[in-house]
Image (cartoon, rainbow, N blue to C red):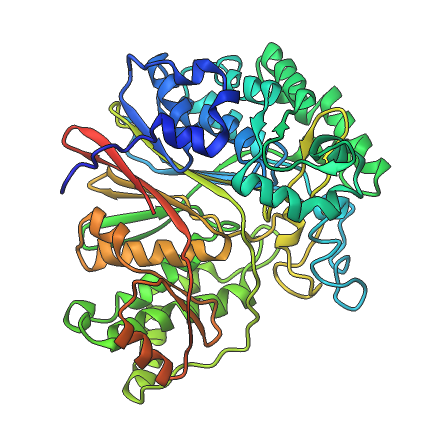
Amino acid sequence: MTTPTNPFPSRRTVLASVGASLLPSRLFAAPSAKTKGIVVGDPTASLVAQQIFADGGNVFDAVVAGALAAAMTVPYQFGIGGYGGCATLMAAGCKQVVSVDFNTIAPDAMRPDIFKADRVKPNTVNTHGWLASGAPGILAGLQHLLDKYGTLKFEQVVQPAIRLAREGVKVEGALASTINVSATQFALDAGSKKLYFQNGKPLKTGDVLKNPDLADMLTTLAKRGSVESFYKGDIAEQIADCFKKNGGLITAKDMAACKAREVKPLEWSSEGMTVHTAPLTAGGLTTLQALRIVEQFTLKKLEADVAATQARIEALRLAWRDRLKLLGDPEAGKIPVDRLMSKEYAVESAYVINAILKNKMILMHNVTPRDQPGTISLSGGDDLGNFIAVTISHGDSFGARVTVEGLGLTLGHGMSRFDTDPGHPNAPGPGKRPLNNMCPTIVTRDNKPLLAIGGRGGRKIPNALFEALTQFVILGRTLKQSMAAPRMHTEGTPALTLEKHWNADEAKELGKRGYKVTTGASAILSAVWPENAGVVGEMR
């Protein structure tokens, strides 16, 4: 395997991404690394991580600092008030992989029928506005990672984020376009209008986005040494008061109930490797279910045949059918996780797929696809032997598109991740956690980490991860080959999206078999792995 020439983002890359003239000079200090490591997934996060390594921190410190800073430079993807996330990690010297769940929770006042389609138009109040937001879990998760696995204090790792918020970032590229797209909702919300408008108009290319209120709040938390008062105390009360003022449901009690927690990852073993991925309400179950089905086929013998490709497609389509019909918060109802992960069910599914392969047909499912963009995913490792993948999200661009006045806290729209059908397992409910697409994953062999990987791209994430792991675990490709291999996307319907470098003849044949084939992008995966006594990584 060849080591990437330069796994770290260059200064020029970061300048182009976030407007370097407005980034704190400390971010560009030449590292004399005490710890050698890497964080991939965002240029600002990667650069801040190198600063943290130079200061003696480990990869968990680096990921937290990088995430906090990136929240200032890509606030449309996620922010301090984002709805939540999850992480999967393996600490040096520990033989166990753990996941950390810091998904949002619905308020106690949440009702299963609140977004029922015959009461409100779907994708309106459950997507934008104060009803769309639950308790924001991101700070709880980052603090947990720092407290249990890091070596630095919150006061240290939050400093780059504070400086970015106070000094501002230049509005350009995706930031400029998403502010423009979100302007209609921003104009209806006092806190958002104050933050994202200037002279009565939305910020445009060349303007500077500053967030002094958020800088002040983070400074207060830094002085207090933790994010505790964000969830219990004066800041939590201020957030709850703003919800009440604007017709939202979150209370101080709901804020206090929002906690990060460690959970046991889902696991699947094959070819001497074990894949550990975040469990429900994260998205990894769908990936592992499809992998278990595909494992029943002899893909290595079929790999030059379109049948092997169709077997992979149909495995994903079955997993998505089950995901969209059966999955939800396992603590709020009975979810058939064991059944979906069983060898028996995988064999049954493979039998069904084999039948349609012989007839060159496709399975038909009554499911509805839904666009769910957003998210950022960071993967990191260090020379101490620590590895982590963490995914954090607003949801769609700027989440709920509402902002807590006085705190500069734009909120995620976690409630949009619930199903509007009150009878669905993923329907809203008091204290429930919504289903999401995050799949932070660690792959091990003999209790040693081989790979930390996660993705961004909404519902495309589970499928992109499935494609990469099929290549690496089942087909035995190298990690570079597995990351480079073309990917597909399906959500159970006949619609099939293939990346542009997919084999044209195969794409044509798949169309003949009944798929509605289009060309489009996959999710972006961020991966790191140990190599040559160091750690390398890629993002694609």
308 above or below 26?
Answer: below
Residue 29 point in image, percent of width and height: 38, 13
Q: Is residue 108 visible?
A: no
Q: Quadrant of residue 377?
A: top left
Query: Does 37 sit left or right of 424 as displayed?
Result: left
User: Which residue is outermost to the top?
Assistant: 223
Residue 265 point in image, percent of width and height: 40, 45
Residue located at (50% from left, 63% from top): 323
Q: Quadrant of residue 39?
A: top left
Count of marks placed on residues: 0
Residue 220 point in image, percent of width and height: 65, 14
Residue located at (46% from left, 34% from top): 17
268 above or below 252?
Answer: below
- Along the line of sight, the residue nearer the viewer: 4 or 144: 4
Residue located at (25% from left, 76% from top): 306
Residue 237 point in image, percent of width and height: 77, 26
User: Which residue is outermost to the bottom?
Assistant: 359
User: Which residue is outermost to the front?
Assistant: 206
- Along the line of sight, the residue nearer the viewer: 14 or 53: 14
Q: Is residue 290 visible?
A: yes
- Along the line of sight, the residue nearer the viewer: 230 or 208: 208
Image quarter hosting the N terminus: top left
Residue located at (40% from left, 16% from top): 151
Query: Does 19 sit left or right of 428 as displayed?
Result: left
